[in-house]
Image (cartoon, helix red, strand yellow):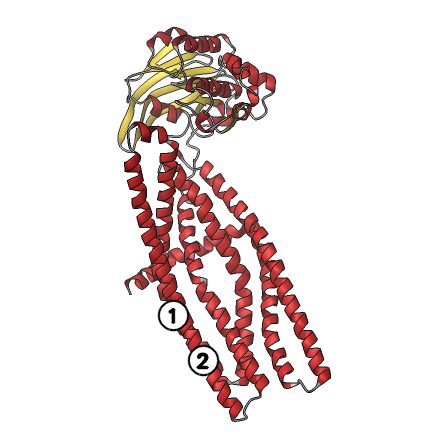
Amino acid sequence: MGKFIDFVKDRSNQRRYLQWLVKLTGKSKSKLFGLFILNTLVAASTVVISLINKEIVDKASDHARFQAMVILMVGLYAFSIIGGLVESLLESLITEKYACQVRSSLFEKLLGMSWKNRTKYHSEELLSRITSDVEQITTGVSQLVISVGGLLIRLVLAFVLLWGYGKILAIATIVIAPVGVLAFLFVSIGLKKVQKEYQQTEANYRVFLQERLSKIDLVQIFGQENSSIGKLNKIQDKRLALVRKKNWWKVLGSGIISLTFTGTHAVAFVLGAVMVNEGNITFGVMTAFLSLVGQIQGPIYSIANKLPQVVGVLASAGRIMEVSECEEDDDIIEDNAADLSDGFLGLAAENVCIGYGEELIVKNASFSIKPGEMVMLAGRSGIGKTTLLRSIMGFLPVSSGKLSFVDESGKCAACGNKTREHISYVPQGNTLMFGSIAENLLMGNSNATREEMMEALRVADALDFVMELPQGIDTVIGEKATGISEGQAQRISIARALLKKSGFLILDEATSALDENTEKKILEAISKSNHPTCLFVSHRRYLEKYADQVVELG
């Protein structure tokens, strides 16, 4: 009873989920409606076949009518079979298009999610929602929308015809069957809770595997093989327990439905036999009688069996809505970023304080960077250098003070997501993606020519080693830049940033994996080129000579 009460209390969310799902169908509505009509016609033909069967049995002596009924029956069966095959073929294609549409929409939403909300989720958790949950929703919605018309048509027509043959049996059939459905509905409430927990466990399962497989070297170097296997077994045991619960609820629900419908069919058979013996109905009517009982039971049984699917769809809808309703990366700038020129940009900080919640990391930072300057950002670990960079890039709003870009004409715009287009960025560590070196470079500028890519590689001191690779710039590097060193990966990342040709370049410990000579060579090449304003973070004090000024946090 407690679960039922919880379900009733949650009805506002269920309604919200349904409204969201209706809106989500978008461009697929017309295609799904077309399949809905086809399914309805196929379903209606199966009910009509019951009437034809009666005529065939009762009019077997009337050869002309018998022959006509047989031909009509064969035609309807052919329509039912062909229509079912066409429906199955189109359903799979439409469902996949529907899934692509939903994934694209959700992917766009994830790309626009604010940094604060994005960091609440593990990347594998988001992957689970955009794959497994979207598949659960699109498959479920497609099947439910397409089949509901046919099920209702079969139910209504069969009941009307059965009423004409025997009112008592019609009433008994339509009353007894819903009793089983209501019992199954109560079962589905428990199933919904298990389904939601299972989906979350499945996401945790994928997160664990992804983390351990992507960091296998760490697992081995710290001797965590047995520990990792033990944790995996615990997760799998929980997953297995939830699968048992899911199957138990499903079996219980199916058992209730089967018991109810078997009983109804038995009553129909006995009652029909009695009526034949008493001469109240013909054998043909008896045939139609039993067929129509099945035509009533079938839709009700199908609807009941789809309840777990409805439960799964609603659970997945809740998980996706949680992500899609997260705060977007709203523009936090006060001025019009579009007014900034495309040239070099300076940066002005006036008593800037930045923090996560109430805790301030950067306190009262004030400095000024002129357009075209090379500036070193220094300070001890934990002082807030990365936090300041996040605010400059518009991921984290300042708590107080003012942080603004300034162009060469003196126009200002507060740092925010709209000023991000003026920034190139090379983060710490290896940030290359699986694919060719050229594909990685084109992330910086999709319109860059081969000559521009080569020049960027030259400035980043990467051209020589890239051209020595088997396919040169078209060499495919593996996950996490497998096949090249970390220092080489950093140099390609610097070339990628230079290709963007932005007005402000940020190097966040971007040369940490390089030897001193290579590091100096790259910074010297950048300083001598027609470079953008460059803010580089480093703990290496010997690099100060390449800076026009040093901004010291602390």
Residue 19 got which mark?
none
Q: List x then y, in percent, for residue 397.
A: 37, 30
Q: Nearer the viewer, mark 2 or mark 1?
A: 2
Q: List x then y, in percent, for residue 329.
A: 43, 35
Q: Which residue is mark 1?
A: 256
- SS at mark 1 in the image: helix
User: Which residue is situated farthest in the right direction here?
Assistant: 64
User: Which residue is situated farthest in the top direction here?
Assistant: 545
Quadrant of the frame with the C terminus: top left
Name the foreground residue: 373 vs 62. 62
Q: Is residue 360 above or below residue 250?
A: above
Q: Amino acid at mark 2?
A: Ala
- Of the image marks 2 and 1, the number of the one nearer the N terminus: 1
Task: Confirm whether residue 185 shows in the render.
Answer: no
Residue 266 got which mark?
2
Q: Is residue 49 above or below residue 284?
A: above
Kindly identify the residue that appears in the image at 61 percent across and 75 percent down: 48
Q: Callout 1 environment at 10 Å: few (<14), some (14 to 19), or many (20+)?
A: some
User: Which residue is situated farthest in the front direction here?
Assistant: 226
Q: List x then y, in percent, for residue 117.
A: 37, 38
Kindly identify the residue that appears in the image at 34 percent across and 14 percent down: 551
Q: List x then y, in percent, for residue 107.
A: 48, 40
Quadrant of the frame with the N terminus: bottom left
Q: Is residue 20 left or right of residue 26?
A: left
Q: Is residue 326 above or below residue 281?
A: above
- SS at mark 2 in the image: helix
In 3D space, how far apart are the residues under numbered discs 2 and 1 (Cα atoms)?
16 Å
Q: Amino acid at mark 1?
A: Ile
Q: Callout 2 environment at 10 Å: few (<14), some (14 to 19), or many (20+)?
A: few
Kindly identify the residue that appears in the image at 52 percent across and 11 percent down: 530
Q: Is residue 229 above or below residue 501?
A: below
Name the foreground residue: 300 vs 347. 300
